[in-house]
Image (spheres, helix red, strand yellow):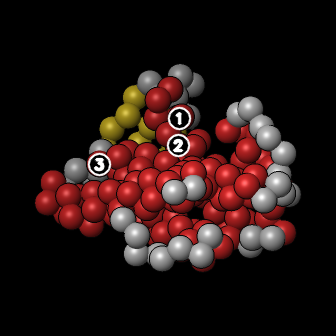
Amino acid sequence: MEQFVEYLLVSKQKIYLAEKLLNETYPLADEPKLFFGVMQNTYFGIKYALLSLFCFEKYFDRVPKVDSMEEMTHILFKESSKRYPALKKIEKDYLVCEHLLSKHKDSMITFSKKENIMMYDDNYNLSKFGLIEVRAFLENAKLFYKEISKVLDLPVDAK
């Protein structure tokens, strides 16, 4: 099996796990801190789909070899977005997920209030996200996965 297919299968697993956490576990536990798990799995689902697309492009010598994930995402978002319009749609969500997860790691205070997560940094600047944002990120990640599956000519239902 080609490496890009393996990465796409990992992407599907991460997105499936995020969906299961959000749709099954969250209603039972009613704990907004589960949103971090959903966000993290959604982020890694997008990241593995991007990695899959990059390996696919590299397989056909359309992109240069890179050393870091940042370079890879830069190349995909800037140069390959002409070939794949789905990249333009997911770029913002990918960067927001990355920002929120890094903000969570660096936040001084994190707590949940109703259906929202509140995070304060060292300067007490507030960042928050809730069920609506998490659900939107997950839905966009699922659409992105389906688009990449079409590009790679793989079945969408693969788990």
User: Badge 3 local density, few (<14 within 10 Å), some, or many (20+)?
Assistant: some
Question: Residue 31's x, y, as percent?
Answer: 22, 50
Crowding at mark 1 (Cα within 10 Å: few <14, some 14-19, many 20+):
some
Residue drawn at (44%, 24%) of the image: 108
In this rendered view, identify the residue nearer to me: 113 or 19.
19
Judged left or right of residue 61, residue 138 is left
Image check: 15 left or right of 5? Answer: left
Name the element at disc 2: helix
Give how far across and how far down residue 81 sits, in percent.
79, 64
Disc 1 to disc 2: CB gap under 8 Å: yes
Identify residue for label 3.
34
Alpha-carbon span between mark 1 and mark 2: 5 Å
Q: Which residue was labeled with disc 1?
A: 103
SS for dot 1: helix
| Image side of residue 75 versus residue 141, left or right | right
Residue 21 versus residue 121 in the image, above or below: below
SS for dot 3: helix
Q: Residue at x 48, y 77 (%)?
A: 155
Indicate the amino acid at tag 1. Lys
Q: Please state which amino acid type lies under the numbered disc 2.
A: Leu
Residue placed under numbered mark 2 in the picture: 100
Q: Quadrant of residue 36?
A: top left
Asked if marks 1 and 3 touch (Cβ < 8 Å), the reply is no
- The amino acid marked with disc number 3 is Leu
Q: Sequence order check: which comes first, mark 1 or mark 3? A: 3
Q: Please, is residue 151 above or below residue 125 in the view?
A: below
Per the rendering, the mark at residue 127 is none
Quarter placement of the C terminus: bottom left
Residue 112 sits in quarter: top left
Q: Is residue 124 above or below residue 149?
A: above
Is residue 116 in view?
no
Residue beneath the point at 72% across and 47% down: 73
